[in-house]
Amino acid sequence: MQELTDRQKKLLILIVRDYIDLAQPVGSQRLVEQYKLDLSSATIRNEMAALTEMGFLRQPHTSAGRVPSEDGYRYFVTQLMHQVELPAALQHTISHQFYQARPEIEQWMTLAASVLSQQSQAISLVTAPHADKARFKHVELISTQGRQVLMVLVTMGGEISQQVFSLAESVTQERLSTVTARLNQAYSGRNLDEITSLGARTDSLENDVSLLIIEDMRRINERLTGQLYFDGLTNILTEPEFTDSDEARRALRLLEERSMLPDLLAHTILHHSAGGVQVLIGGEGDWDELRQCSIILARYGAPGSVTGMLGVLGPMRMSYARTIPAVRYVAGVLSDLVADTFADQITP
Amino acid sequence: MQELTDRQKKLLILIVRDYIDLAQPVGSQRLVEQYKLDLSSATIRNEMAALTEMGFLRQPHTSAGRVPSEDGYRYFVTQLMHQVELPAALQHTISHQFYQARPEIEQWMTLAASVLSQQSQAISLVTAPHADKARFKHVELISTQGRQVLMVLVTMGGEISQQVFSLAESVTQERLSTVTARLNQAYSGRNLDEITSLGARTDSLENDVSLLIIEDMRRINERLTGQLYFDGLTNILTEPEFTDSDEARRALRLLEERSMLPDLLAHTILHHSAGGVQVLIGGEGDWDELRQCSIILARYGAPGSVTGMLGVLGPMRMSYARTIPAVRYVAGVLSDLVADTFADQITP
DNA sequence: TTTAGCACTCAGAAACGATGAGTGCTAAAG
DNA sequence: CTTTAGCACTCATCGTTTCTGAGTGCTAAA
């Protein structure tokens, strides 16, 4: 890739910013006047032609101004944006909100989603923390009605799974308690492989429950990610690029179907760019439905054990300068919270 | 209200159906040709004028055909629609899906939402079952790390709440188990009032936990409804009345903010119309944002104990004939499932 | 009570021209 | 070599106008 001159860089910055702000192709004249450049519009035109040639700008039509191309945004984000932190005041309000919320995963997730959508004026996505390999923490059997029993399984990563099942014959709550006590003792802190390798239990009821535990843990392991939360769906409907509502539909569809989640995850795992924040521009080839969109992604949690993902989905013309720091910061806050809450899981 | 002649009723039915189908004002000529009426268009025009006079039809502009008014839809739904059941085949596929899903509330809710949005081609809303007065079923304390303890509370209505707290001093898991055993014994099946009236526990730790239980149960009671699930958000974006995307935004906003949930609930409680299905047309005065929308609502569960709500939000021009039976049927299925699962709660 | 006939209305499409912001290019000036 | 003034050209957008036709209401006859 050819090197840009300083002036070209400066120009590209101005164009991207201006377009992000006003959603309108920016012309040479406007640029000179608005930003008091000590150059004539003709010079700017020459530079813009060069930038277009290099693929950083596009012209919607011959007689219109320039608009950043995908590559233009990408260059802007990777090369031209100085990595700023979120303003301290904002950091404080945000972290304050988290620490005064009730210490529940669900609260944190909805709060994170809300903060991100507010900051970015776009759609926010947050997945609950999820352990790559769930470790058993606790099981409980609660007799419900007759021979029906509710089993509640808690993993060290904080994931809970419940299951109702029927016993062959009626059993006292006492009996259930001794069974769970023994299983809790035997399985504590172990992952699926370790539990299966322990083999069958001698007691018949205990063995039945053990099999259910294995089933549940397998199911938890098979999940690639925790529960998905999102917020700010309506934000993007205000953006001019989504007024035709067909574009918007395609983007929202993708969200509702959740089919892209695995791919997003893969991205956050593979490319671990500086600052831990990934930026995918224009769907980055993977999603045709998101050709108009950008995604800003980050992982949070303790790599290798309990992690989650959070991100923002907005128009390509979104404010990267505001959103990237916000995503980074919230990821940091969630990481801290997760580290506190699942300290046992993280340092086994 | 003036009585309609049979012919007027028949005409109103045709107009409503035609408009729901094609989203276009229907004119006298079209009506005669399309439905092979043995009348001239002039006669139809007279009747349409009468129906307009009575407030059942509207004219978008002088030279356009007629469109049902809110009252028109309302009359159609309450007086003219014969209450049909969902086709047996469809009933079977749906109930089959429920019974082969895993017996978890969450599965049922997402499935219900998915089925409803599919059937109605609109947005579906489902709230998880919620007990008006939660009854204690079980509490569990799980020591996490050092003095941190995770408390898991299960109510008889199937609601689970977790809370993390810190002990003043380190305590063995054994001690925790005896505490929960005693509390489970004492509180089993009791509601908040009953538990508070039992007064303080003598043991200090036990009392602390008891207070946390009360706090959690109060919080559960304060919720008006279970978790909200929805599906099919993108459906309404295809409808012509939402192409301007501003109308769509307002409707979706209302959903995201959840501010209308309580009012919806009130509706399902107050007006318990025939078949248990409520139809709110044009926001019914309560929501300005939904002036273009209709809501079809039903309650499910065991009245007075564990109940939830489900419904469909779509354009006023939605297919009532298809949606109402679907809502009714799914409500029935969920009621059965809830009755099975929470039999103990329902017949105390 | 129904219908043929007729004048009238008016949204929406199509055609048109004017406007003006923007371009690329050339040739002169710095 | 870089910058800029000048100029011809492009073309989306906007407002105007006209045309069309689906649809109406009304009247008078069947």
Image: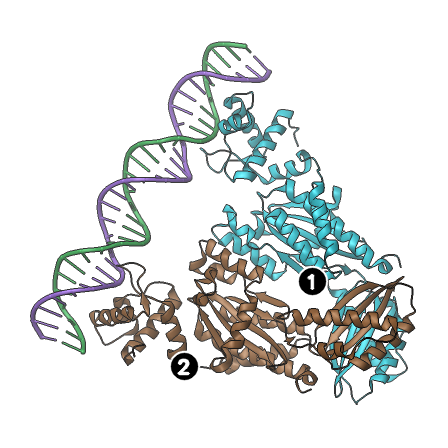
Chain colours: A cyan, B brown, C green, D purple
Using the rendered view, name the quadrant where residue B175 is placed: bottom right
Chain on which label 1 sits? A
Which percent across, then down, holds residue B105? 67, 74
Q: What element carries label 2?
A: loop
Residue drawn at point x = 44 percent, y = 73 percent: B320
Residue A321, above or below B212: above
Q: Mark 2 lies on which chain?
A: B
On the image, the x and y values in percent for residue D21 come to 25, 57
The kind of residue on which mark 2 rests is: His
Label 1, label 2: how far apart the Cα atoms are: 42 Å
Q: Inspect this view and state whether residue A138 appears.
A: no
Residue that mark 2 sits on: B82
Considering depth in this image, is A44 or B312 the residue closer to the camera? B312
On the same chain, marks 1 and 2? The answer is no
Quarter of the image holding residue A200? bottom right
Give the amino acid type for the residue marked by disc 1 in the picture: Gln
x 60%, y 61%: residue:
A257
Asked whether residue B113 is in view, the answer is yes
- Is residue B336 shown above or below B47? below
In this rendering, is residue A282 above or below A75? below
Residue A22 vs residue A268: left or right?
Answer: left
